[in-house]
Amino acid sequence: MSKPTNVPWHTYAKFGGIKYVRIVVRSLHKLLLMREPVWKDISYFKSEAKKYPQFTKGYRHWSKYYILYKIVRKLKPRFVLECGSGISTAIIISALRENGGGLLVSLDESPEYGNVVRDIVGSEVETHISPSVEATYEGLTGTKYAQIPDYPYDFIFVDGPQTQTVDLDAFYVLEKNPIAKVLIDCRVATVRALKQRFGGLFNPWVNLGFINFHRK
Ligand SMILES: C[S@@+](CC[C@H](N)C(=O)[O-])C[C@H]1O[C@@H](n2cnc3c(N)ncnc32)[C@H](O)[C@@H]1O
């Protein structure tokens, strides 16, 4: 996006220029990922997904994939909840395998993606197909999966369900474990709502929200 003449440089740098910074940061993260053992699983997932016509999106969110991988390696969570299945499912499984254990529960609204992801990554993940529903949580209107399997999650990755408002799943999980860490992909309203209650930040350079990472 080139700078419109009526927009001051500092505003353009903050909002318009972010797009270019993200492209550079994303490329660096891809290079870093290629050096990790998880790259083998990423390549396998990509080649298998090509066999399914519904997998139309390319893979370019390398910052998300790299940071997700590094967080799971570092935190060594015992129970991970993933909201929104995809190549990220293969990445989390790979990191848990390297850690030596941990259960991944992956939720998706759509059987045509969720079931295929399970077929590609295998039985190491517990996949659930669940429709999304409108819900209200302490005055906050949003969207959640109808069924969230009950486990003591210590890490949540929010990348679904699709919403125009707020993804509420993390709020329900945090009721049971208020210090669970949450990584959120690009959902600014969800990050804002979680930040107000639990603390955290949105990093615009990688388009991710981090909740509870300041807690021990
Ligand atoms: C934001 S995507 C979630 C992607 C996943 N967390 C990832 O990072 O790989 C939201 C939805 O798109 C669908 N989806 C996943 N991978 C896809 C692909 N390669 N092409 C098209 N749709 C996909 C799934 O139904 C998923 O819940």
Image (cartoon, helix red, strand yellow):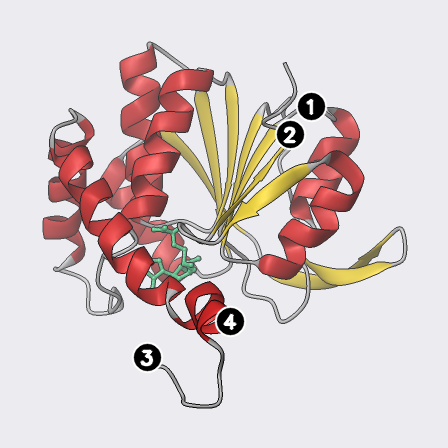
Amino acid carrying label 3: it is Met
Residue at mark 2: 212
Q: Quadrant of the N terminus?
A: bottom left
Residue at mark 3: 1
Amino acid carrying label 4: it is Thr
Task: Spot the residue most to the top.
Answer: 100
Q: Earlier in the sequence, mark 1 or mark 2?
A: 1
> Would residue 167 be seen by someone viewing this image from the given angle?
no
Q: Between label 3 and label 1, give the one nearer the viewer.
A: 3
x then y, percent, for residue 209: 54, 45
Q: Quadrant of ligand 1?
A: bottom left
Query: Which disc number belongs to residue 11?
Result: 4
Decide if residue 71 is on the left or right side of residue 162: left
Q: Earlier in the sequence, mark 3 or mark 1?
A: 3
Decide if residue 68 is on the left or right side of residue 208: left
Residue at mark 1: 179
Q: Earlier in the sequence, mark 3 or mark 4?
A: 3
Secondary structure at numbered mark 3: loop
